[in-house]
């Protein structure tokens, strides 16, 4: 969750306003309130809110009318509709008209917070621009690098962004595939339509089909109400299927059918829903080998493989490391309390000599730690070494047992390669624990923090410290 996110609550029930305002404020959100639908529309048009939460029945304008008006005025603004059981069909209509999602009253607060976090993430993905080359010092998201490989990628983005073709982005973990997807979306003719991202690897197989295509009431145990899937949310816009190589063959069959027929049926439903969605997919896996091993469908591969963008690993474009270092120093200077961060040329050269198995994401996390270590002093090789010593190996535990990993740490300590084996083990296990909890909770930080027995503040601190993705799922 982004503590600076601003929520517009449109609700005329004083008791609900007081309760939700207190809950959202306690969670770190900035909350603005309007009691009429027409006033909410005017406020949303002029205010820089990130998400709107609105009741269905309002004076002035109904929630449905508000959704339709904002779909025209601010098409990329996520709207969460609150509705009673008897008006669920109207909520479905609102979703088809552009609402991000809906909640059926009475709902649990964790359900609202989980949905809100996803909506805030979706808002940022759609509205925060991805720049090229880090030309602007204030850029928060940028695809950085002027080497030959990156110049080729910029040209490819420019060539295919506006064309209605599927794009497959390939590259190792941490190379920045999501940034490429967002750049393609933002430079396309669908830039004012929805952009919906889903991590196929972070959602259990039993839930992925429902997540993608939606479900009808009673379609399976626990399906208490009809739900709209991500493809319907993305209708007329773009869907980003991250880590598609991790999708099971059974779900691949259904995805292939949807892409081929350009329509879908919700799980347990008979209604055929037409679709106009551009698909951008990404994977770090070797799909050709997966096809030979019968783990990935060949017909789906060719359906997605219309245009391929290969993102090289950082070790193959080390000439871009100085630009990346400069960008990350500027990006994290404020949070580290450093006004004008500087780095010695020898330290930059030292960074260029590293292997970076975790790619750009690993370099980013190291630079964040370096800023905290160096404070206002010029960053030296010693600062870099200290940050690397504290860094968690990108592979983490992987398939190893904890005992084997412990043995490796002690052996490294015996060779004099590290002096903090206990801290390294604790960080590795803790990182895996927090990461897995977020994935299994589908990004719901309320649920994940409850499972782990920690506060939301502690969870957020660990997300930052370990460079985790807070929107998993």
Image: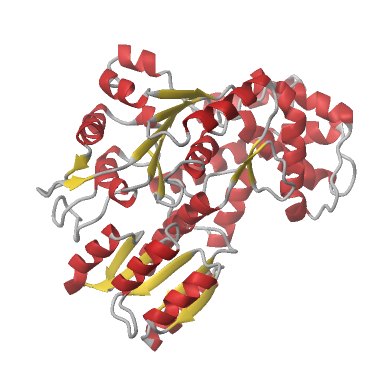
* Whole-percent x, y for residue 277 in the image: 32, 42
Q: In front here: 220 or 146?
A: 146
* Residue drawn 34% across the image and 48% down it: 234
Q: Is residue 145 above or below residue 9?
A: above
* Residue drawn 63% across the image and 21% down it: 149
Q: In front here: 448 or 136?
A: 136
Number of labels in the image equals: 0
Q: How was the colour assigned to the protein in this rendering?
A: secondary structure
* Whole-percent x, y for residue 108 in the image: 34, 69
Q: Is residue 128 above or below residue 416?
A: below
State which quadrant residue 263 falls in: top left
Q: In front here: 438 or 311?
A: 311
State which quadrant residue 130 falls in: top right
Find the residue positioned furthest to the bottom: 14
Q: Is residue 220 above or below residue 112?
A: above
144 lies left or right of 23: right
> Does the image show residue 452?
no
* Residue drawn 30% across the image and 20% down it: 295
14 lies left or right of 370: left
135 lies left or right of 190: right
* Whole-percent x, y for residue 177 in the image: 52, 33
State which quadrant residue 408 falls in: top right
* Residue drawn 45% across the image and 23% down it: 308
> Does the image show residue 284?
yes
* Whole-percent x, y for residue 332 in the image: 72, 48
């Amino acid at each position: 969750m982004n503590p600076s996110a601003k929520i517009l609550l449109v609700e005329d029930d004083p008791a609900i306003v007081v309760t939700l305002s207190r809950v959202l404020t306690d969670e770190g959100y900035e909350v603005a309130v309007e009691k009429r639908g027409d006033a909410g529309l005017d406020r949303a048009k002029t205010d820089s809110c990130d998400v709107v939460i609105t009741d269905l029945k309002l004076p002035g304008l109904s929630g449905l009318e508000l959704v339709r008006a904002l779909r025209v005025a601010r098409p990329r603004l996520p709207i969460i509709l609150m509705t009673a059981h008897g008006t669920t069909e109207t909520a479905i209509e609102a979703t088809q008209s552009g609402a991000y999602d809906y909640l059926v009253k009475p709902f649990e607060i964790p359900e609202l917070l989980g949905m809100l976090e996803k909506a805030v993430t979706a808002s940022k993905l759609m509205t925060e621009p991805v720049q090229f080359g880090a030309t602007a010092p204030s850029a928060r998201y940028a695809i950085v690098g002027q080497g030959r490989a990156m110049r080729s990628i910029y040209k490819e983005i420019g060539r295919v962004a506006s064309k209605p073709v599927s794009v497959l982005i390939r590259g190792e973990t941490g190379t920045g595939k999501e940034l490429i997807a967002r750049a393609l979306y933002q430079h396309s003719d669908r830039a004012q339509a929805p952009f919906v991202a889903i991590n196929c690897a972070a959602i259990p197989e039993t839930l992925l089909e429902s997540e993608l295509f939606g479900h009808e009431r009673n379609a399976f145990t626990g399906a208490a109400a009809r739900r709209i899937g991500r493809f319907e949310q993305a209708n007329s816009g773009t869907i980003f299927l991250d880590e598609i190589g991790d999708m099971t063959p059974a779900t691949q069959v259904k995805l292939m059918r949807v892409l081929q027929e350009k329509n879908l049926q919700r799980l347990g439903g008979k209604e055929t829903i037409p679709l106009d969605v551009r698909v951008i997919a990404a994977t770090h896996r070797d799909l050709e080998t997966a096809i030979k091993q019968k783990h990935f469908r060949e017909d789906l591969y060719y359906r997605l493989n219309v245009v391929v963008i290969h993102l090289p690993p950082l070790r193959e474009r080390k000439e871009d490391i100085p630009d990346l270092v400069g960008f990350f120093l500027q990006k994290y200077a404020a949070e580290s309390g450093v006004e004008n961060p500087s780095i010695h040329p020898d330290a930059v050269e030292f960074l260029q000599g590293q292997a970076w198995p975790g790619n750009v994401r690993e370099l980013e996390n190291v630079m964040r730690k370096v800023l905290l270590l160096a404070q206002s002093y010029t960053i030296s090789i010693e600062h870099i070494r200290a940050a690397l010593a504290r860094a968690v190996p990108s592979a983490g535990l992987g398939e190893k047992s904890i005992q084997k990993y412990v043995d490796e740490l002690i052996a490294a300590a015996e060779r004099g390669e590290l002096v903090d084996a206990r801290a390294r083990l604790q960080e590795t296990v803790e990182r895996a624990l927090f990461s897995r909890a977020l994935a299994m909770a589908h990004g719901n930080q309320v649920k994940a923090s409850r499972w782990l027995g920690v506060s939301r503040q502690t969870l957020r601190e660990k997300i930052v410290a370990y460079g985790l993705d807070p929107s998993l799922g």
